[in-house]
Image: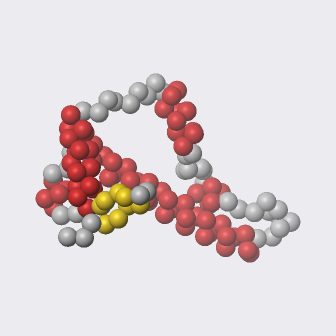
Amino acid sequence: MSRCEFLAMAPREFDAMTERLRTMREDARYNAAMVVAAIYNVNRDPDKRPGGFTPEDILGKSNRQTLEEFALECERNGYKPLPPTEEDRAAADKFLEGFQKTFKHQAGQVQLVKE
């Protein structure tokens, strides 16, 4: 992403990017914990720890939230999604227009348009 593209982002786009970055870091941390748990499990004493280690044991707590847990938490907190703004609709239209210029849909397949 160029500097101009970054500076032209709407606040919602910036929030979405920072949320994605947080999720990617969380996933990387969880993946590393999986490797550590596997190493521990290979070298563990089955008499002392018959169940083995999980990534949650390594992280100290569960930092993974399922989609169902997230939806229930939103429901409990009274979350109501905001209706799309005109800016959102314009951005979606612009994206769709660019997508249609780049790709064509024919007979159930999406193909790249060669200029």
Q: Residue 37: tell me if it is visible.
A: yes
- Where 22 falls versus 37 (above or below)? above
Q: Residue 32: x and y, percent?
A: 55, 67
- Where 37 falls versus 92 (above or below)? below
Q: Nearer the viewer, residue 59 or 100?
A: 100
In-image side of 88 versus 52 (left or right): left
Q: Residue 91: x and y, percent?
A: 22, 44
Q: Residue 96: x and y, percent?
A: 27, 49
In-image side of 60 versus 41 (left or right): left
Which quadrant holds residue 107?
Answer: bottom left
The residue lying at 52 percent from left, 39 percent from top is 70
Q: In which quarter of the image is the C terminus?
A: bottom left
Q: Which of 9 and 23 is in front in this view?
A: 9
Residue found at the far right of this picture: 47
Q: Nearer the viewer, residue 98 or 48?
A: 98
Q: In which quarter of the image is the N terminus?
A: bottom left
The residue lying at 48 percent from left, 57 percent from top is 26
Display coloring: secondary structure
Residue found at the far front of this picture: 107
Residue found at the far left of this picture: 4
- Where 25 falls versus 95 (above or below)? below
Q: How many labels does the image show?
A: 0
- Where 44 falls versus 7 (above or below)? below
Residue found at the far top of this picture: 78
Q: Residue 11: tell me if it is visible.
A: no
Q: Residue 113: x and y, percent?
A: 27, 66
The residue lying at 26 percent from left, 55 percent from top is 100
The residue lying at 57 percent from left, 39 percent from top is 69
Q: Nearer the viewer, residue 96 or 115?
A: 115
In-image side of 62 versus 74 (left or right): right
